[in-house]
Amino acid sequence: MKPAPFNYVRADSIEQAVEALAGSSDGKVLAGGQSLIPLLSMRLAGPSLLVDINGIAGLDEVRADSDGVHLGALARHADVLANTAAREVQPLVAAALSHVGHATIRNRGTTVGSLVHADASAEMPLILLLLAGSLDVVGPRGRRTIPAESLYIGPLESSLEHDEVAVEAFFPALPPMTGIAFEEVARRQGDYALCGVGAVVEVDGGHVRSARAGFMSVHDVPVVAELTEHLAGMSLSTQEGRVVLEAAVEHAMGALDPAADVHASEAYRAHLARVLAKRVVAAAFSDATHRAATRPAVGSEA
Ligand SMILES: Cc1cc2nc3c(=O)[nH]c(=O)nc-3n(C[C@H](O)[C@H](O)[C@H](O)COP(=O)(O)OP(=O)(O)OC[C@H]3O[C@@H](n4cnc5c(N)ncnc54)[C@H](O)[C@@H]3O)c2cc1C
């Protein structure tokens, strides 16, 4: 099918993009087009205006510093994935990004576009939420920072106003003594996942200090479960630790609402969430203990 007719503005600056959006009640930003163009072509969306931001200079930055990873609105998934400094500062971003679509999708699609698109089956909204990151947006009322916890308000719905442009995402750095893991199950490599789970675990002396797990494709928004209350003080490499982890995951399942579709029944999705959560939290614990054991002693770098 062909898209319905629309007007097109190629913005040269963020101000110009904001101005164009403000003059329309249903205008849409065009970034990589990997989600928007299929929606237009299938006539599942029919905005009267597209504001193309691909000509705005300086929006493609991928920057990693000691605080975390900053991604401009035109940073393509592939550029983020290839950035070794970003991988070192926050390895969970790359771990999840490698599961996003196929190479061609990652070459064009933007990570910020994925965050705004707010698909509960997409990897990056979950990772932003799990890491308590944020999104900076610019609109006619100025610039504001939206914390991830208030970004996802419904299926394919983020809390940006229709006249705001997302300009930068921020993923906080991995703290010391902390490990990560991410796994998903998809019918084929590159497909949207039937279920995906990420985890962040902090250790202290070989025991859990804090732990949380995030779930995608099992609710209409990404969901993060706080597991610290259940797991604090436990070693997850012991039999006792594994039993406690099983109970913690069961508790987390209460916050999920897996739905059936043509690819998976409700029960199968719930099964995947349980199995992946146990595996991924245990893997993040191992990663944390490994990182803690191999961490250079203070002052040894001199
Ligand atoms: C075959 C296929 C497989 C895919 N598989 C996966 C997958 O496994 N996992 C996954 O996560 N994604 C997948 N995707 C989607 C892909 O990751 C997209 O790149 C991403 O969802 C959107 O990024 P984009 O830059 O293409 O945004 P666009 O398609 O240009 O825009 C998407 C939406 O976000 C809005 N938007 C984009 N950027 C901004 C901005 N800066 N400010 C305000 N609004 C903005 C647009 O207006 C639109 O509503 C797949 C896509 C395809 C076609």
Image: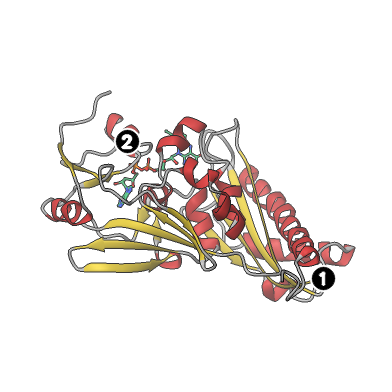
x, y percentage for residue 95?
61, 48
On screen, residue 293 above or below 47: below
Name which residue type carries label 2. Answer: Leu
Q: Residue 300 carries which label?
A: none
Q: Which of 200 and 262 is in front in this view?
A: 200
Mark 2 or 1 closer to N-term?
A: 2
Residue tagged 1: 206
Name which residue type carries label 1. Answer: Gly
x, y percentage for residue 170?
45, 62
The residue at the point 32 percent across, 39 percent down is 36
- Label 2: how many Cα within 10 Å (few below 14, some 14–19, many 20+): some
Q: Which mark is residue 39?
A: 2
Asked if residue 222 can be seen in this view, the reply is: no
Provide the secondary structure element on which disc 2 rests.
helix
- Left or right: 147 as drawn, with respect to 42: right
On screen, residue 210 above or below 164: below
Task: Note whether ligand 1 is within 8 Å of mark 2.
Answer: yes
Quadrant of residue 210 in the image? bottom right
Query: What distance separates the C-alpha of mark 2 from that of mark 1?
Result: 48 Å
Q: Where, quadrant-wise, is the C terminus in this rendering?
A: bottom right
Provide the secondary structure element on which disc 1 rests.
loop
x, y percentage for residue 141?
19, 68
- Left or right: 29 as drawn, with respect to 93: left
